[in-house]
Amino acid sequence: MENLFDKRAAEKRNDPDHPDVSPSAPASPESDSGYTARELKDTVQELLRSGLLEAERKPNLYRSALTHRDAITAILEPLDLRLRIDDVRGLAFLTVAEALFGDELEQWSHPLVRRQRLTLEQSLLVAILRQQYIAHEQEAGAGAGDAVVELEELLPQLQVYLGDSGSEMKEQKRLRSLLEALRGHGIVSEVDEREQKVKIRPLITHLANPESLQSLLHHFRTQATDGESENA
């Protein structure tokens, strides 16, 4: 199947108004033959595959995103996608063009963007983890890595809002299931089984605005309080 890059190259070769590139011209993301450079292809394909690049995990592709930002923007524009850079935290990630957002935001889905439809419990954990990450940055500085949290520290925070089932095994299973779901969205790392810790990834700062997450926490806190009153 012809991919996006080859299609763009073919269109340029067939365009009579498209100037030929001089052999003596400086190197650019697109080679003299009309094909997109391998480095640029790899960078855009990884962005389309996972939605983000982290300097810590993929330093070469992240640097490529910074170097070829204009070229990547041009490639993404027909797809109604945008490249955003958070150089403080070493992040390059995709967003959907703001022009597509209107009153029907909840009903709209871009075919190349995985819809981050989180359950209420998953969203609650995101709010808790975001508080942890912001507290870590306030102490260690913006962009500081190694924001980790112990599972034993997360579990009681979840129980404050969701209640305690009375079974530690069941509570642990619920927490791990939620963390695994968030790992698929690039929000946390895999659980370190030896130290029983999980790393919070910097993408969490861009996932949702703080006001929405605080409202969610307030909603769960109110539900928990009402539940205690009814059982009194």
Image (cartoon, grey):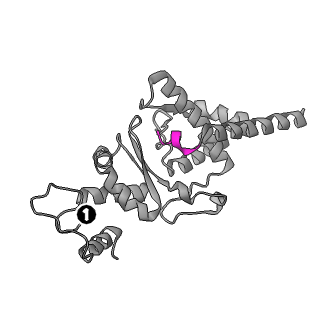
Secondary element under disc 1, as helix, strand or loop, is: loop
Depth check: give the residue in front, 112 or 157: 112
Image position, residue 34 (x, y; %): 21, 68
Q: Which residues are the magenta region?
A: 202-208
Q: How many marks?
A: 1
The residue that label 1 is drawn on is 36
The residue positioned 21% from the left and 68% from the top of the image is: 19
The residue positioned 67% from the left and 46% from the top of the image is: 121
Give amino acid for label 1: Thr
Q: Is residue 163 visible?
A: no
Classify residue 221 as left or right of residue 180.
right
Q: Is residue 30 visible?
A: yes
Depth check: give the residue in front, 175 or 148: 148
Q: Residues within 10 Å of mark 1 (few under 14, many from 20)?
A: some
Classify residue 42 as left or right of residue 179.
left
- Quarter of the image where the N terminus is located: bottom left
Position of 91 relative to 78 (above/below): above
Image position, residue 230 (x, y; %): 89, 37
Image position, residue 197 (x, y; %): 50, 34
The residue positioned 51% from the left and 66% from the top of the image is: 111
Q: Quadrant of residue 7?
A: bottom left
Position of 16 relative to 109 (above/below): below
Image position, residue 59 (x, y; %): 30, 43
Classify residue 226 as left or right of residue 152.
right
- Quarter of the image where the C terminus is located: top right
Q: Quadrant of residue 14?
A: bottom left
